[in-house]
Each structure stands twice: as structure tokens, then as C-alpha cells.
Amino acid sequence: MLITTESRSEAGLPTRGPAPASHRPGSFRGDIEGLRAVAVLLVLLGHAGVPRLAGGFVGVDVFFVISGFLITGLLLKEHDRRGRISLTGFYARRAKRLLPAAATVLLATLALTWLLLPRTRWSATAWDVVASAGYAMNWRMAAESLDYATVGQAPSILQHFWSLAVEEQFYLLWPLVMILLGWIARHRRRRRDGLLLLGLAAIALPSFGWALATAPTDPSAYYVTTTRLWELAVGAAVAVAAGRSSRVPRAVAAVLAWAGLVAIGASAALVDTASGFPGYAALGPTLGAAAVVGLGSVAGRAGPALLLGQLPLRAVGAISYSLYLWHWPLLVAAGAYLGDLAVGPALAVVGASFLPAVLTYRYVENPLRRSPALTRRPLAALRLGVACTVGAALSGLLFQLLAVPGTPGTVPSAIPVQAPAGPAASAPVPSWGAAALGSSPRDSPAGIPVDRVDSIFPDPLRVGEDVPAAYQRCIVDQATVTARRCVFGDPAGRTTVALVGDSHAYHWLPALDPAAKRNHWRIVLYAKATCPFVEATVIFAGRPYETCTRWNASVRAALRGPDRPDLLLTSDAGYLVVENGRTASSTMALSPKLRQTWRGMVDAGVPVVVLRDGPYHERNIAECVAENRKRLTRCASPRSRLDSGGGPAQKKAAEGLAGVHLIDLTDAICPADRCAPVIGGVLVYSDNNHVSATYMATMEPRLEAALRPLVPAR
């Protein structure tokens, strides 16, 4: 049994007697090095798409526990040895250990972006570099997870920096909390470790509670620091209690430590994005890792150290940081250059990432970490870290300024229908956008794909700025559950038309808004990202989209209230739906749910008009056009893809339903046997499934002609 004693440090702070060397956190342990290897390999294999390893991302949770354990252990060890904690020394060690390698990968990522990524991604990557250098990438990812414009977009080449940002924020916070609690312990004559455990509980419990409350419904919960602190706090608590671990019988410790390792593996195999992470599902890898690091030294060779202490795993664990840094940029760059990677090629890329990881470990990490000069002069190490951070951030800004095309002027609030203002006005086309198709789009030569056009508007490199800001702020994020509306068209119009649905309803607004102004219709928009207007629970990001269900209930109440519209206009993308507690296998299962929803609105006295969803393309059209300006036919998709998206389910749902009409303008979007990426000098799609705002604006006359007979006169 370990007997703890109270002694006075030179600073007068109560401290515990030192734990035995075998249990002391902060001492090197081969089993923890091996656990690092397990964690990073789970992440790598999961990112490579290895079957039955959808939960490979739990390796990040293991890293959080290890980090909390080791950092706290090192700080406790320093205090036990010196009687104080040096913030300068701590941050200097973190700076020389982490920042040079991170800066190296950030600079290399800019080079990969220049060489291999479509130019449409350059600007986002530049800002990702800035956010990653400042260790704020998790908050950037959280914000983008709530932005409808990023749904379905290619993943960031630096999105893996989110977990490093969480750890760095913990490193900034926790030493300060430890010093504060130590000061309280000294002045109140309390046991240091007891106060530390109370402090960790005060961090972990609200954090875990917040994770439970938000993870099932809020995509940003995966990234934010507030839902992740509890995992680091668990590791820190294990370090604080490490001296007491020797009280556990070795056989019991071995069983629990092995169970912890099994829990990590089982979580990787069984957990997926539908599990509401990081809620209850995160307990498996987190507590499993805590058992391994907390009891592994007690169990000795009878525990997981027998496996984790093997040289190959320890070797991978040693380079795990550099390996984590390198693997994702290489996977994304290879995918951008070669197309979607199957498991085999992805594993080859992961294997190739070992080379730069080893080189970074040998020539960047180790020389700086072991530098006698930097060890003796912590301020010099801090200056090095600042230089790496500032240098990487400035590189991202310079890339944005020099490599990314200049930012255009403010997008006009009313998108031109006949011709663009600016360089594209010189395009030698008989009419602008969909107007070039004339009255018979299927017979028009303007709809046939060609290799070259004289000009394209909007510029595919800036297509994200094509939608006026007045429209953008009126589609709510995934977390919102209470109906919120925006009014367009003629606000004083006597006829009210409600436009309801997801972004595939919302993207009709550039055509509907000016038509409504001219006809004195009042347009009331209720739009929620990735949320179709349906009385059912749909699947988003692999799990039931409960906030969508609640949003739709709120919208239905609004539509049947005092502000009941004269007409409901709706559209949506294709979705899987929950039926009898299970996810349906086809988006066509949404059809009877749509029919039920529309019938309910008709029964409430509101006629329904459905705007048929357009075809989806196999690739991002803006990216393809940006890279193939002289071979645009490479970006043309077969018209047979009309059966993709929400169109088929909508068509079936509307058949023979009184009070419901379907408007199908697909011929004006894809008039030929292959869908042209550019029609009448206008980029048709902004990604692979959303019609660009400018092209949609040129659809105004067609939409108005189809809609006017269906809008009740008042």
C-alpha cells in the first residue's frame, strides 16, 4: 500500500510524497508509446476507409486521454521536484516539441495545394492554414459544420488540425488552473491532489454534460473544445491519482487494463458517426485509454504492456505526432489528383506518409526537442515557437493574396438576368444563361456541351460568393429548431407564398424573388440546411436528424397559424428516412412521407407546388470547370443522372394528389443528352447538386410562367 505524506515544499505548497518510479506519471513508459501507435493507426486506417473500422476516429479520444495524463504528470513531477511550476518552461517545451513540425507540414500543405488541389479550394486552404497555425481550427470546423454552403463540399486538407487545436487550448488552460488550485491549497491548507481532482471534476462534468446535450443534434459538437475537455480531464485525473493505483492488486489491474484496450478496439469497430459523438459513445475509448495508462504500470507484463511494449508499436508511437500531421494532407491531395480513392490506394497513401513522418521526426522534432541550447534557454524556445506560428500564418495569408485570384466586388443584391456586369458582358452568346435555350431547350444548340466558351460567369473560382448576402443569412443551421423566416418579393403584397425546405428549395430564390416583386407576391422563406419539409425523421451525417424533425413541426405550426400562406412552394434533395426505427435503404422511401405532408397542407387549405429537384453530377462542376476551361466537355454528365437527387421521390409523391402540382424545369438545367456545365456563358452548377445563383436568376421567366397560373389571386 502506498503511504502518502504531507510535506512542505520550498514554496510552502502542500504536496504528496513521491510515487514509486514505476507509477509516477511523467516517467517514460513503453506501453504508452505503444498506445500512441494504436491510436494513430486507428485514425489512419479509419481515414483510409478500411471496412469495419468506421470508428477509427476514436484514436483521437485516446490521444486526448494520453495528453491529459502525460501533461499533468509532467507538471506534478516538476512541482514535486522543484516545489513550483514554471509556465515559461512548460510552454517552451510544448513550443519546441509541437510547433516546428506543425509549421513544416502547414508549409508543405500549401505546396500540395498549389500542385494538386483544384484552384477552387485554394482560398479555403489558405485560411485553414491561418486557423491551424493559430490552433483555432476546431472552431473553424465547428462553424463550417453549421454552414449549409459547406455541406457536401470536399473535406479540408487540414481538418485534422482540429484535435491539435483542442489539445493546445487545454495546454494553455490547465497549467494556469493547476497553479491557481495550488495557491488555494497552500493558503487553505488543503491537500493539493484533492483540490486538483475537484477542479478536474468541475471541468469534466459540465463538459460531458454539454456533449450529451449537443452531440446528438449539433454537428459542431464534434469539434468544439467545450465538448472535449472532459476527455483530457479524465487523463489528467488518472495522473493525479497515479500514486494510488498501486493499491489495486496486480491481477485486477491486468484485467482492467486489458479490458480498456479491448474497449478501444471495440469502439473503433462498432462506433460510427451515427453514435452521437462525443457523447456516451466516447466513454468506451476514453475510459478504456484511462484504464490502460492508469493501471498498465501496475499490471506490468501481465497487462497490455506485453503487446504495447513491442518494438514495432513503440517505433510507430514515437513518430505518431508527425504521422498524424502528414497522413491527411497526403490523402486529400491524392484524392483530388486521382479521384476518389478506394481502400487499396488510400492504404498506399497512408503507407507513403510514413516517409515524411520519419524524416520530420528525425530532422525537425528530435533535434529541436533535444537541443541543449533551447533546453537551457526557454525564452529562445518560446521565440522559436512564435516564429513558427507567425511564419505559418503569414504564409497562409501570402498564399491567399498572391495565389488566389483577387476578390471581386460586392455581389449585387439583384442578379442580372440578361447580361452580367463586368468582363463577362462581352461573351458572344445570343442570350444570357437559360435565356439562350429559347422556348424549346431540348432542341437548342446552346444546351449542347462544348469544349470552350469565351467567358464564364460567375468565375468558378469565386462561385461561393455568387449568392447575395441577403439570401445567405436566411437559411438556418442544423442546430436551429424554432421556425425563423425571411420575407422577400413584395413585402406589402396581398398574396403570400411560403418557400419551405432545404437548400434545394432555397436555391430557387434568385429566380423567385424578382418574379415575386413583379407580381406583388410576398415570399416567406423557411429554410434549414439539409432539412426537407416532411413529417418524418430523415438521416443526416449518418444519424437521425432530430433537430430537423423539431424544426418542421415548428414550421407546420407557423404555416397553419394566423400567417397562413396562400400557396406553399417546396423542394428538397434526396434523403434517407427513418421507418419503424430503422433507416430505409432508398431515398424513394421518402416519397410516401412527402405525400402525407403535402396532403396535410392541402387539407389545411394551403395548395402545394413542388419544384422538381434537378440532376446531381458525379463531381463538383465549379471545380471541374476551373481545371478544364479548354475541355469543358470533361465536366458534362449524362442526362440519365436525372434519376439522382430528390426528383424521383417528389414526382411519385405528387402523382394524382389533389391540390398538389409539380413544376419540372429540368430541361432548362440539363437540355441535352449530356448536361452542359456552362450554358449561355453562365456556370450552371456551383457544386455537384446546387444550381448557381446566377444561372437560377436567368431561369426567372420560366419559373414565373409556370408559377403564375398556380398562385391564387387575391
Image: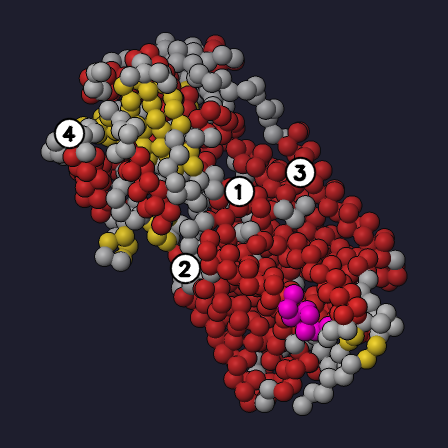
Q: Nearer the viewer, mark 1 or mark 3?
A: 1
Q: Which mark is residue 143?
A: 1
221 up-or-down from 26: above or below: above
The amino acid type found where label 2 is placed reads: Ser
Q: Image point 56% across, 76% down: which residue?
A: 291
Identify the element where label 2 is drawn. Answer: helix
The residue tagged 2 is 275
Tell whether 350 sits left or right of 696: right
Q: Closest to the observer: 54 or 627?
A: 54
The amino acid type found where label 4 is placed reads: Gly
The residue tagged 4 is 659
The mark that comes first in sequence, 4 or 1, is 1
Question: Magenta segment, which residues?
Answer: 192-199
Identify the element where label 4 is drawn. Answer: loop
Query: Magenta span has 69?
Result: no
The amino acid type found where label 3 is placed reads: Gly
Gap in angstroms between the C-alphas marked 2 and 3:
35 Å
Dot 4 alpha-carbon crowd within 10 angstroms: few under 14, some 14 to 19, many 20 or more: some
